[in-house]
Image (cartoon, rainbow, N blue to C red):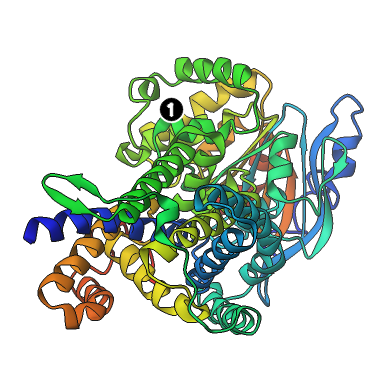
Amino acid sequence: MARWCGSSSGASMSADPVALLAAPPLVAPLLTAHDIESGYGKVQVLWGAELAVAERASVVLLGPNGAGKTTFLKVLLGLMPAWRGTITFAGTDITAWPSDRRVRLGMAYMSEIGVFTALSIAENLAIGGQFAAPAALRRRLEALYAAFPDLAARRSAAAGSLSGGQRKMLGIAKALAGSPRLLVMDEPSAGLSPLFVGQVIAILRQFHEDGLALLIAEQNVKFLDLADHVITLEGGRTGFSGSVAALMEDDQLHRAYFGL
Amino acid sequence: MLVHALLGGVIYGCYFTLIGLGLNLVFGVMRIVNLAHGDVLMLGAFAAFFLFHLVGLSPFIAAPVVMVGFFLLGLPFYYLVVPRLALAKDAEMLSLILFFGIQQIIEALAAIVFGSSERSIPGRVLGVGPFHFLGQTLSRAWVIGAAIAAGAVIALYLYLYHTRSGLLTRAVMASRDEALASGIDIHRISARAFAIGLALAGLAGVFAPFMLGSVTPAMGVSVNLAAFAVIIVGSLGNPLGTVAGGLIYGVGLLLMQTYFSAWADLLPNLLLIGVLLARPTGLLGRRVRLA
């Protein structure tokens, strides 16, 4: 068990975030994961992880390297099998679904790499919008190009020719091309300078305000600016689940993630 | 003599491009080596043989029939074999063993069913008389084979670069993991690529009686060797790079046959060894793991 778990104040701790979110009846959970166990081969990484993302919510999954964040996200997207537990999206049990069906239902995933470097910007976006009808995709892409002017200027350039920050922007645009209801991101800050981290957060905020739900796995606490709910993951187990303010109030958590 | 060897080499090389094309597409998408590729070609050749001698179908009609038939057989075969294979730890190695076994089975069954005698289709069914070009006289079968191959390359290019399914295919080729993460149905795309690979092998097979001489159940092995030389010289995993490999192979073969005819059969081995030593990623090298 994580060193800070079980010792924080009872109100902010929740063994079952699903139940916690179900309490205010207006906020329907978009994505839930209950008692998830998974791993690679015989190595178990997740030991009963829990998570809920409400419609239009923004959740940051906070945890150190090796805590199982990437594994958890991959299980949520169907890129790795869940050994046990259930996952629902928009009220449907998707635990056994392959990833393409989950994407079709409105989930989008941005991996740490996030783009096809060998393909052009326009091709990357077309892949992101593969399930959209042609006319809707065209409209969506124009909207995205308006939001990402750097990409619009170089549509036929290979994604591999972009800088790290631009690639991250392309990864976001690609994930959004299919007009998802939920964007799941694995460490969007990885390899980015603080300046670009700020830009990424700004663009995500813009789409979030338009109704996009976010689930972001991060160890960069800057992303808490964007969060209305924080879940911590350590040693493959989710611990704290609550608002950013509650996290700040908790001395031990505060020390663990912000230093002093 | 040199001009003839070069020109003939380019034209003959187009056909070798066709031989390697399907194999390279399958490797590019699935990172699986279809060692039975040459035997699928052999089956295409026998299909053309029987369609001609039993039903009287010209190879030009047999070609689309064989392609559609092989494509439709390829889809269920893919789902039967490959998804399970992909679960294995070292799928690349296991695919070699598995497809080697399949290759042996196809060859043995073909020998039992068709017999081991040499079969051929008279060359006149493709039309009579050679072509003349740049003052050279060229075999009619070679020119037709080259035209068919060029058509297949163009069709594959149009598929890969101008259809949605082709874009997703290139995405899988570029990065399997990212393709999965992007919600691409990898198995549907791969099954399609696998089936197209078989259809292309079948197409090459239909014209094999005119390009490679008589047809026997044992021809698959040497065809495989040629196909491997072509795609490794071109670049593994890049279907359109096959063209470079095919042309180099064709020109090399004709030069060898013209000047060192006794040594010509060594060519695929020499090319393989030479390229693997000098540029292991192929002449148009992209970084892929060599199986």
Q: Residue at x 59, y 30 (%)?
A: A129
Residue type at mark 1 is Gln
Q: Nearer the viewer, residue B54 or B116?
A: B54
Relative to A19, B16 lies left or right: left
Q: Residue at x 17, y 78 (%)?
A: B261
Residue A252 appears in the figure: no
Q: Quadrant of residue B6?
A: bottom left
- What residue does disc 1 label? A199
Residue at far left of view: B2
From the image, which quarter does the N terminus of chain A lie in?
bottom right
| Residue A39 in the image, given as x and y percentages of width and height | 68, 67
Query: Does residue A133 lie above or below B158 as drawn?
Result: above
Q: Nearer the viewer, residue B168 or B151?
A: B151
Q: Is residue A151 above or below residue A119?
A: above
In the image, B261 versus B10, the foreground residue is B261
Which of B184 and A30 lies nearest the eye of the viewer? B184
Dot 1: few (<14), some (14–19), or many (≥20) neighbours within 10 Å? few
- SS of the residue at dot 1? helix
At x 57%, y 81%, the residue is B107
Residue A11 versus residue B210 in the image, above or below? above
**Number of labelled discs?**
1
Q: Position of residue A242 (x, y in %)?
A: 74, 40
Chain where mark 1 sits? A
Query: Image check: A195 left or right of B189?
Result: left
Q: Is residue B220 left or right of residue B165?
A: left
Q: Which residue is drawn at the image coordinates 35% and 57% (left, top)?
A: B15
